Every structure is written in structure tokens, then in C-alpha cells.
Image (spheres, rainbow, N blue to C red):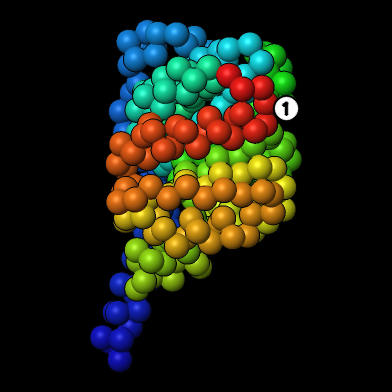
Amino acid sequence: MRSVLALVAIVGVVLGVLWGFQRRLIYIPLGTPPPVDEVLPAADAVVLTTADGLELDAWHLPASAGAPTVLVASGNAGHRGLRAPLAEALGRAGLGVLLFDYRGFGDNPGTPSEDGLVRDAAAAREFLVDDAGVEQELLIYYGESIGGGVVTALSISHPPAGLVLRSPFTDLASVGRRHYPFLPVGTLLRDRYPLAEQIAEITVPTVVVLGTRDGIVPPEESRAVARVAAGPTRTVEIEGADHNDRALLDGPELVDAVVELAERVGKAP
């Protein structure tokens, strides 16, 4: 009896630790971005203000006349400097780009959470529309991995002209169960990102980009998202690409997919 009680106590402690510290496992704000002129000299350093009063650092690369702008919501790790090659590639095609760090990432204040990240993306959109003068009809959301859940949530209240989801999952619990099948992930998770449920309500043109050897978000997760998307949807599968491979950062197939969508929703850059 004592051994059973001890086991129950140990399990309870482990689950309690996972409940309290899970966001430190989900969000990995490693490093600080370099100065913008070192990695993206054509962009301007700007500040976003969230609805709950946080000031977030961002970089804005203006679009060519009449071309769409891409709001980039990063994945769960790193900082905006790591996405500079993507912005540079899109900029060469004439597209505008906004790179920003979530709360708690880079030098930004705050603590990451699902609600917080969606507020951060909303602040990025507000800057582009209200301060930079980007027309809603020329605004594309780009979500990388967990960022796909962020921009999909934002699309419910503020639909873009087009949506790019790179390595999206159906929901965070589904991915968690694949990696931790021995844990009650669905019960423990505080942040959910119900991407598949939400994308089924969004009718804008959508592109889903995935790597066929993605070891973090399995390809079938991304394919499932594409199947339930309500808008006209194109799936781009990059053969042999894993989750963090260069091909899924600024590879030609990825960049071409974004540019093709931009040409569909606005004037060709």
C-alpha cells in the first residue's frame, strides 16, 4: 500500500511540475537579434504596442508600390534575426515584410503564452495597417509552425488577403501526444492552438507548406490542416525537408509559394 501511495505521490509531483513549467518547454526564446542594419539593411527598426501595454521590437521592410506585405509570425524558438533570410528573399521579389519577436523573446518584456502571442500578432497587424498604411487587401499572414496557430487565430477576427502556414499542426495537443505518448498531454496543456478547428472557418486563399521528413510536426499533421481549410488551398510539399532545414526557412520552393500567393491576392510585385 505504501509503495502505491508513494508512486501516486511521485506521479502527482511530476504532473504538477509539468503543469507549472510547461511553457518553458514550449517557448524557447534563445538569443538576441543583431542590429537590423547588419542582417536586413533595407528594413527599419520599429516598435509595436500590444493591447496589454507591452512594447515589442520589430523590423519592417516596406513593399514595392502596389505589392503585398507579409506579416511573419515565427515558430516557438529563436528570434527575428534568424528569419532575416526569408525577409530578404521576399524583399527581392518586391514584397514587404514585418518580422517581430513575441513577448519574452529577444529583448522584449513579458512571458509567452497562447493569448499573449495572438495579442502580439494583432499589434503587428495594427502597426502595418494603421502606421505603415498597408491596405488589408494587400496583407498576407505567414505562420511558421506554432506561428501558424497564432496567425490562424488572428484571421478569425481580422482576415488577411491570404494565409501561408508553414509546417502547421492540427492542434498543439496532437503534436504533443506524438512526442510524449506516455503523458496525458490533452489534459495538461494550458495552450491549445486549435488550428484545424479555426482554419475550417477561414475562407481566404491559403497555402500550406510542409517538409516530407519533418520530425517535429509530422507531415500528416500539416496535410490534415490543408484538408479542412475552408478557403481555396494549395499544398506545397518540400521533398526530404526536416522542420529546421534551410529549405523551410528561405528555400526557393517556399519563397515561390509565398510570391505566387501574393500575385493572386494583389498586384504582382
In the displayed orientation, state which residue is furthest to the left: 3
**Residue 183 point in image, percent of width and height:** 38, 70
**Residue 55 point in image, percent of width and height:** 55, 20
Q: Which residue is mark 1?
A: 137
Looking at numbered disc 1 in the image, what kind of residue is underneath it? Glu
Q: Is residue 71 above or below residue 162?
A: above
Residue 181 position by quadrant: bottom left
Where does the C terminus fall, quadrant-wise?
top right
Sort mark 1 into few (<14), some (14-19) or many (20+) by Cα contacts within 10 Å: some
Q: Residue at x 71, y 38 (%)?
A: 159
**Residue 145 point in image, percent of width and height:** 45, 46
How many numbered markers are drawn? 1
Pick the residue in front: 128 or 161.
Answer: 161
Q: Is residue 50 left or right of residue 202?
A: left
Q: Residue at x 37, y 40 (%)?
A: 248
Q: Secondary structure at mark 1?
A: helix
Q: Residue at x 47, y 23 (%)?
A: 90
In the displayed orientation, state which residue is furthest to the bottom: 1
Q: Is residue 192 left or right of residue 135?
A: left
